[in-house]
Image: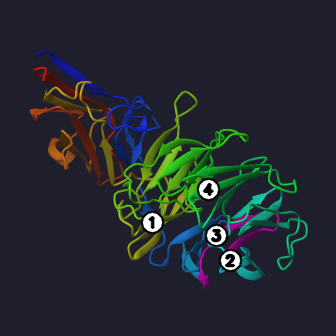
Amino acid sequence: MAEKLLSINYFNGGISSGSKIGLRGSFRWGQGLDIHSDPDRLQIMPKSTKDSGTTVTDLILFGSNNTVNANRYFLGDAGALYKRTSAGSWSKLSTYTDAQGMGFFSGTDKVFFVSGNTEYQLDPSGDTVASGRSLNSADWHPVETFLDKVFLGNGRELISTDASDINLDSDTVGGGIQIEFNFKIKCLRNIGDWLFIGASSDNSSVAKYYIWDGTSSTYNFAYTLKGEDGINSVEVGDDGTVLVSAGKQGHLYQLVNLNTNLKRIKTIPRIEKDKTIETFPGSTENFQGDVLVGLSDGTSLTAERGIYSWASTDKNYPHTLNMNYAISSNTTTGVTLQIGCLLAADTNNLFIGWRDNTTYGVDLISGTGVQSTAIYQSLVHDNGQPFRRKHYKNFKISLSRVLRTGEVITLAYKADGASSWTDIGTLNFSVDGAIQTKRFKPDIKSRELEVQLTFANSGSTAPELDNIAIVFSDEDLI
């Protein structure tokens, strides 16, 4: 039969919703891949390095910057309040009850946080903490600044303290509204001229969200998402994209405009049908203009619990889903792996609060180095004829530059939906030297084929992939 060529040289389509067909350049799975810096090459994302040493002993759920100094403050699920100085020194300031919300307000130069249904105010100039008013009982009391006020979710109430006259022990000062009965506010986000209010209900699989202008006596818009167990988190990208995580099945939505319901745009992959995954309110962030989401909780054993991005290279490319980072332990699955918090310190530094079984920590991504492990898995190839067997004869891996010290790529495949990967060979600097291409002849006969590249990087650099070329032929019709 005539030989044909399968050439894979586009990589910027992100994680595909389908196993065989997706956007141009999409793949079935990827971890730690940089698909946006140069959309014509496959590169590797910067590494995650544990920054907190042994200081952090619970799951960080919230973090806050401030404009008084360069210290960062973090609140853990067991109530521990931490400080990281500009020099990178970590300390535990005090311990409260739990972590329900946190945010900085430049109007008073204070960090507001909520623990044990009590509002607190931290002064970064001396790390003193003043306790304030008692709040209604709720799992979450999100904190957000909007229209020169600090707003807090207080069960079904949205309450505020006015910038010009703070009184922590007062009732609502400077405005506030109530949402519908049987719902509690779980997340808040300033989306420009409006405040997004996400809510959940303890007694139904219905999510509600509200849009408020900050001055009206009640919310301006209200919408329902049936079948979703609450609005978990919301984040805004530099391009104006408002990304919403809802429910426990990994569904991501986009707020397209104010007068229509949310539009579902993607689902986090690898979640079993009878299991769950959830994002906590503090595990989203705008980092370098892109929206990031960390997977926080749930019963799924197979979901890859890393930090995902919903981003595009520029206006000429579509938004795509990508798993940018794994935590520094490189663990990616299991119910005891949790991403609790994302905090962008500035344009170059991202903090990640995590739990890996009985170990806790905060990673720092600073743009240096590369992820120690990265994975690319192609879409399933069947040449549009899954009923015909193919003969996959020759493989060629081409890089955009030569291999460097510490760089290794392992090529593997799955045939006809096999449960495990079979190695074909490696490109290894310590064995092959500074090569830029390598050929393999595995002689595979199957109806369908998937290809995997695993990048193992022991140094400060990683290979850059240019092309995967596979020569194959179709065998008899059936």
Check disc 2 and report the residue beneath it. Answer: 137
Which residue is disc 3 drawn over? Answer: 140
Residue 118's disc is none
The secondary element bearing badge 1 is classed as strand
Whole-Å distance between the Cαs marked 3 and 1?
A: 17 Å
**Mark 4 vs mark 2, CA separation in Å:** 19 Å
Q: Residue drawn 59% across and 62% down?
A: 281
Camera-near label (1 vs 4) is 4
Per the model, the C-alpha gap separating discs 1 and 4 is 23 Å
Q: Which mark is residue 338?
A: 1
Q: For the residues marked 3 and 2, what is the alpha-carbon distance in whole angstroms? A: 9 Å
> Which residue is label 4 attached to?
207
Q: Is residue 392 above or below residue 213?
A: above
Q: Quadrant of residue 75?
A: bottom right
Q: Is residue 382 above or below residue 219?
A: above
Q: Quadrant of the C terminus?
A: top left
The range drawn in magenta is 93-114
Amino acid at dot 4: Ala
Q: Quadrant of the N terminus?
A: top left
Query: Between residues 336 and 277, which one lies in front from this camera angle?
Result: 277
User: Which sits earlier in the primary sequence, circle 4 or circle 2?
Assistant: 2
Relative horizontal placement of residue 275, taking residue 428 as reference (left or right): right
The residue that appears at 41% across and 30% down in the rendered structure is 40
**Mark 3 and mark 4: Cα distance apart in space:** 15 Å
Amino acid residing under circle 2:
Ser
Q: Which is more N-terminal, label 2 or label 1?
A: 2
Disc 3 packing (10 Å; few <14; some 14–19; many ≥20)? many
